[in-house]
Image: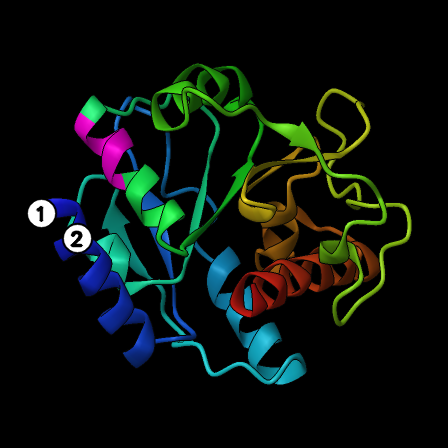
């Protein structure tokens, strides 16, 4: 009964707010609040370039809250530890299977903690790398080589991983790219304009893909 109620909440919420995104707050001590200027800048870029009408200031929602069902798109980032209780994992699983989308952007250092917690959400699914010809790379902007490299970190190649259900990509994990740093105000990281542009374009592709699918 609770799951049915949440599905109805989600349906009503996304009908009234089909183009809204929120920051996902999680437990464990990791800095879920990292990159404070990133999403506002990405939202502005999307509203100007892909005809979205997203609220300029994204809200923050907790993993275990029913408030996540008000948003078709959630963004999660950080550097450190992540922890999902079983109740939180169940809530997030229901949200995703109900049509929600989660983008997790590794701000550097969250990957081992994330891989430990995701099996709580989907014990029967694994992260799989997206090929360069996946549609998420050919939305408004074309990235024929896949995910762009924004920050060096460990010098590894950037990778996009996903979790699928019935051929629908419902969770995207971007690793060794750090798109969020590229979305931030120019003065924060002093990234060249062309690097910031690639980050914003890829972010817009992700949002466009999520809203269409």
Residue at image x 28%, y 68%? 11
Callout 1 secondary element? loop
Answer whether labels 1 and 2 touch (C-beta < 8 Å). yes
Provide residue 212's location: percent of width, then percent of height. 57, 69
| Nearest to the observer: residue 42 or residue 172 | 172
Q: Residue furthest left?
A: 1
In the image, residue 143 above or below residue 177: below
In the image, residue 109 above or below residue 11: above
Callout 2 secondary element? helix
Residue at image x 75%, y 57%? 135
Q: Crowding near pointer 2: few (<14 within 10 Å), some, many (20+)?
A: few
Residue at image x 61%, y 68%? 208
Residue 83 is a magenta residue: no
**Badge number at residue 141:** none
Provide residue 123's location: percent of width, then percent of height. 41, 20
Provide residue 64's location: percent of width, then percent of height. 19, 39
Q: Is residue 86 left or right of residue 96?
A: left
Provide residue 192's location: percent of width, then percent of height. 80, 55
Which residue position is annotated with label 2? 4
The magenta stretch spans which residues?
87-91
Q: Crowding near pointer 1: few (<14 within 10 Å), some, many (20+)?
A: few
Q: Is residue 5 left or right of residue 188?
A: left
Question: Alpha carbon of mark 1 to alpha carbon of mark 2: how far?
Answer: 5 Å
| Nearest to the observer: residue 210 or residue 6 | 6
Which residue position is annotated with label 1? 1
Residue at image x 34%, y 21%? 120
The rendered magenta stretch, by its main secondary structure, is classed as helix
């Amino acid at each position: 009964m609770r799951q049915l109620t949440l599905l109805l909440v989600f349906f009503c919420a996304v009908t009234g707010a089909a183009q809204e995104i929120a920051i996902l707050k999680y437990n464990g001590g990791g800095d879920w609040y990292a990159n404070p200027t990133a999403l506002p800048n990405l939202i502005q870029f999307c509203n100007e370039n892909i005809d979205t009408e997203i609220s300029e200031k994204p809200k923050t929602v907790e993993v275990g809250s029913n408030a996540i069902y008000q948003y078709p798109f959630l963004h999660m980032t950080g550097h450190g530890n992540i922890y999902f209780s079983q109740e939180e994992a169940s809530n997030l699983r229901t949200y995703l299977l109900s049509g929600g989308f989660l983008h997790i952007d590794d701000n550097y250092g969250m990957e081992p903690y994330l891989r430990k917690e995701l099996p709580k959400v989907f014990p029967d699914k694994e992260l799989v790398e997206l090929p360069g010809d996946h549609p998420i790379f050919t939305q408004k902007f074309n990235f024929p080589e896949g995910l762009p490299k924004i920050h060096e970190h460990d010098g590894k190649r950037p990778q996009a991983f996903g979790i699928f259900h019935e051929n629908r990509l419902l969770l995207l994990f971007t690793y060794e790219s750090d798109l969020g740093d590229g979305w931030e105000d120019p003065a924060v990281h002093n990234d060249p304009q062309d690097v910031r542009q690639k980050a914003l374009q890829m972010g817009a592709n992700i949002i466009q893909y999520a809203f269409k699918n």
